[in-house]
Image (spheres, helix red, strand yellow):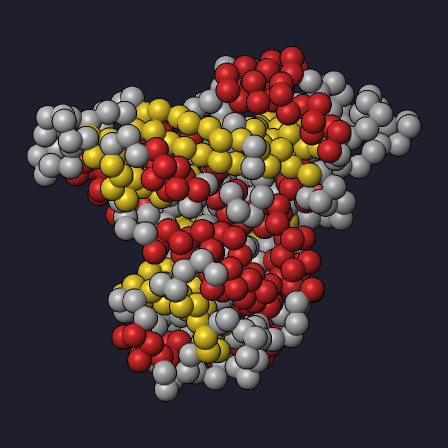
Amino acid sequence: MRIVSTLLFGVTLFSSLVNADTSSTSTTSSLSPEDDTSQVLVLTDDNFDARLTTDSLLLVKFYTPWCGYCKALAPEYEAAAVALRDMTDKVTMAEVDCSLHEELCIDHDIGSFPTIKLFRNGIPTLYDGPRQSHAITRYLLRQTQPAVTLLEQDDQEALNTLRQLDNTVVVGSGSTHDNNTAYTTFKLLADEWRDRYMFGWIAVTNGSEDDGGNLVLYTRFDDHDDTMDIYTGDRNAIDTIKTFLRHHAIPLFGPMGPDNYLDYEEAALPLAYLFIDSTFMLESFHDPMTALAQHYRGVVNFVYIDADAYPEQADYLGINTTVPDDDDDGPAALTRTSLWPAFVIQDTDFNRFVLSQKMEVNADTIRSHVDRFLEHTLTPFLLSDPIPNAPNDGPVKVVVGTQFQELVTNADHDVLLKVYAPWCGHCKALAPVYQQLGELVQQQSYPLRVASLDGSSNDMPADNPAAFDVDAFPTIAFIEAHTHRVALFPADKDRSLAELVKFIHEQKEIAGKAGKNDPLVMLQLPQDDKDDNGDDDALVTKNDVDSDEIETQQQQMIADDITQSNKHDETTFKVDDDNTSGDDDQIRISQVHDEL
């Protein structure tokens, strides 16, 4: 199974950071409109359209005062505005309080908070980069420059000036004639990726029309580390150039943080983590790890993480973060005196391969582990809760990672599996309905296993035929017995008892198991829930528990998640309870990073 990593990867790594930011900020999302010291322009229904006309570059933050993420963003946004004030007058930073200007926010398709959009001559572009002030500042400075800055040949001073504007600068050279396809390709790339990098072109005046040298990528990852990488491939192969930039625009061996974890994910390479707990430990590993990273460049990326700051990420990756008892001689027992350093590789399918914590962690053991990983001789770690001690014979069976094969893959009957997270408001709202379904199936001895799996603390085994990708919580899947065909409950359907039963019926029909005399006919709601004609297929949404009561419970659970903005749900995860656009109300895992 692949539970999309932007949730379980990004959230576990940076939840403590977001919580800390939220708790340290004020109860409003930014300085008040009356505060003359703020560099952020307050937009309202009265002045929004006018500013779109007068400001060629307008960055707008759409927020609400109760949103935990908005509180965390406020000081960073203000700091970016202050920094830009002294750098350029070409950009205006502004904000809209959507609790006061709801229609304005709806008109601009604001579906969650905070949302940041850049309006260039009135045309909006969503900003989905890091939410730190220096990242916002860097992004806006890029916007003030042309997509491609033309440089004169041998003008080293102009090149140095361009390099000082950004940490990542791509420079090409050759003729600027329209017949130079390399230059045309370069301009297309710059137009598409101007949000990521600064682009410059050295105009060669004494070459042929199609003359062009290599592309050079200049990167600066800290104050003392300037690097230069040369692309020597096809200058017209834009996808190949993109791959080169993704792989080389990140440090050989650098820290994993909120500014860059999406860069590593987008690089689409296995990621090797070294967990350290001191500056001394980092210094001792820096040179050998950098050498290893250079050796495996383009194959595996290497990062380090502060183990004390992000223990949740270590847990998620399968590293034992608890010192065992002296008499613990099990497989997780340590023979070292410290938990750290620790090393683990996560592949592009999010399988995790932990270097045994019984072994010493050094350059030799790490190299051996990476080689075995590349040879596919390692066994991936399986995240799993303990097998339940109590009898697992309730209406809804509890599935954990280590029992997935037994309870799902090898089941004699079809399985309906709900993948959820305990903190998910919509999962809480679904719980009583799903419990009803399990009771209905159990009461009628219907041939279906109703089960649930906590996707925040359990994996589905890699390469298991019944496993499936999870892109949102909750996800409900029908797994056909023996064939392992998987069908997902449609995201646009109401998660009511009636719709769930209809979904089961549809899947049974597809499997050829819903004949006239099939027991499924019995899987109906009570007689008083049929329509006026007594038809069995007129399902409604109430059973032993009245539908109004269920709806009230659901609404209250969702409301609790929204209003308690400083609790774990809102300070750590993006919940589309904030959704004003009418889209599906699931928690969209693929968008969690928007809130980090």
Give the total of numbered labels. 0
Task: Give coordinates of residue 301: x percent, y percent.
Answer: 51, 28
Place residue 334 in its image quadrant: top right
Residue shown at the point (43%, 64%) measured from the top left = 116
Q: Is residue 505 above or below residue 277?
A: below
| Front one among 223 and 425 | 223
Q: Nearer the viewer, residue 88 or 239?
A: 88
Where residue 70 sits: x, y (%)?
55, 67
Q: Position of residue 514 (x, y in %)?
A: 37, 53
In this picture, residue 259 sits left or right of residue 325 = left
Question: Given the current orientation, which residue lies at the most extreme bottom position?
Answer: 46
Task: Decide which of 487, 220 is in the foreground and name it.
Answer: 220
User: Is 192 left or right of 32, judged from the image as shown?
Assistant: left
Q: Is residue 248 visible?
A: yes
Residue 348 visible in image: no
Quadrant of residue 355 within the rendered picture: top right
The picture quadrant where one finds residue 318 is top right
Residue drawn at point x = 68 percent, y = 44 percent? 310
Residue found farthest to the right: 326
Question: Quick one: quadrant of the C terminus?
Answer: bottom right
Residue found at x 39% / y 48%: 487
546 or 141: nearer the viewer: 141
Residue drawn at x 52%, y 42% as measured from the top left: 261
93 sits left or right of 276 in the view: left
